[in-house]
Amino acid sequence: MAFLFLAAGVVYPIFPLYMSLRGLSGVEIGVVASASALASTASAVLLGLYSDSIGRREALQAAACAALAGLVPVYSLASGFGWFLPFHSAFMSLGGAAMSLSGAVAMDYIAERRGARFGALRTSGAVGWVVGALVGGYLVERASYQAAFAASSLAYAAAAALYGLGAGRARQAPAGAAKPSPLSRGAILLLAAVFAASASNPAYYTFTPLYIVEELGGSELEASLAFAVTPFAEIPAMVALGALSDRVGRLKVLAACFLAYPLRYGLTGLLRRPAQVVTAQLLHGLTFAGLYVVGSAHLADAAGGATGFALSLFTAAFNLGGVVGGYLLALVQARCGYAGMYLAAAALSSLSLPLLLASAKLGSRQRSPPREQP
């Protein structure tokens, strides 16, 4: 998992810069990004379903990583919108599916205390991503994009080799098992809550750097710090919140995660100093790390043998929320400015809590024993 996320971390942040270097306009880059996000979401669900049906998840993951290792160097040949649109969509489809499937592979090793143990395993991916992003930026600045592509390819190859070595040693997912269904009404409501919360994510990923520089008069360094500080909250939160959910229940921890969304965006819009805004982004430990780990554990608990499908649906809800929210929040920002946009993000993400409460109520009703007839 560490090598998989390291490989992605090397190239994902530099893709927009590389596309611009190869002649794509801002609009064309946006179209490519949107198309690849939608393709990645669909492929994650399909690969998750397939992994449940064959019951050999880790071997499938090794094959996906090996294919990615071969595809990354092809970017050196890419040129023009007509080239990037199909190829980048295909690459991101496989890459996104592999990252989603990594959670299901990890779950195959875990029978008890899933929150804590999955959180601990997932920190390896977080560390890999941070290291990869630093390596990719360094190689582009000091060497070339081709050097970054080569480093990513080697990391994908290492991930393929390690997943291949693990195939057969993990507790295999039972083929075709899918009881209880991950598409129960409670699960659907939880996924709707994830969608509502993630629709606010562009307020952070897209607009926070612009807000710090254009609205608050901060520097580019201060804008980058808004992203650099998040791993310090994210990595420990994965373990701590996962373990807490084992003790107090998944839904209670998820409620805290969803409450943190409007708090984070409300603070970001109200605070007037760049350093204060950067500090508020430490809530990322709840709004990403806690939500991902505990939400994945909750769906895996309910999915039985259909872990791959269940976790792919979590990824789909998270990604699609970001796609829809990106357009909505861009319109609000254009009409109402940054203050209005952050207020809209807080209001939008607050819809997740009633959806979670409805999911919890429905789940408790389904678990209640039927009343005896007199």
Image: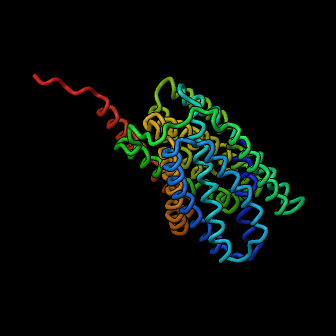
Residue 348 horizontal/vertical position (percent): 45, 53
Q: Is residue 247 visible?
A: yes
At x 61%, y 35%, the residue is: 238
In the image shown, does 278 or 252 lie closer to the viewer? 252
Image position of 299 with respect to 370: above or below: below
In the image shown, does 249 or 286 lie closer to the viewer? 249
At x 50%, y 56%, the residue is: 321
Quarter of the image where one finds residue 69: bottom right
In the image shown, does 310 or 243 lie closer to the viewer? 310
Q: Is residue 126 visible?
A: no
In the image shown, does 296 or 54 lie closer to the viewer? 54
The colour scheme used to paint the residues is rainbow
Image position of 288 with respect to 89: above or below: above
Relative to residue 277, is residue 55 drawn left or right? left
Q: Quadrant of the N terminus?
A: top right
At x 60%, y 59%, the residue is: 93
Question: Among all residues in the image, which is located at the extreme right?
Answer: 142
Residue 130 horizontal/vertical position (percent): 74, 45
Relative to residue 363, is residue 269 drawn left or right? right
Residue 65 horizontal/vertical position (percent): 68, 51
Question: Among all residues in the image, which is located at the extreme left?
Answer: 374
Relative to residue 220, is residue 255 drawn left or right? left
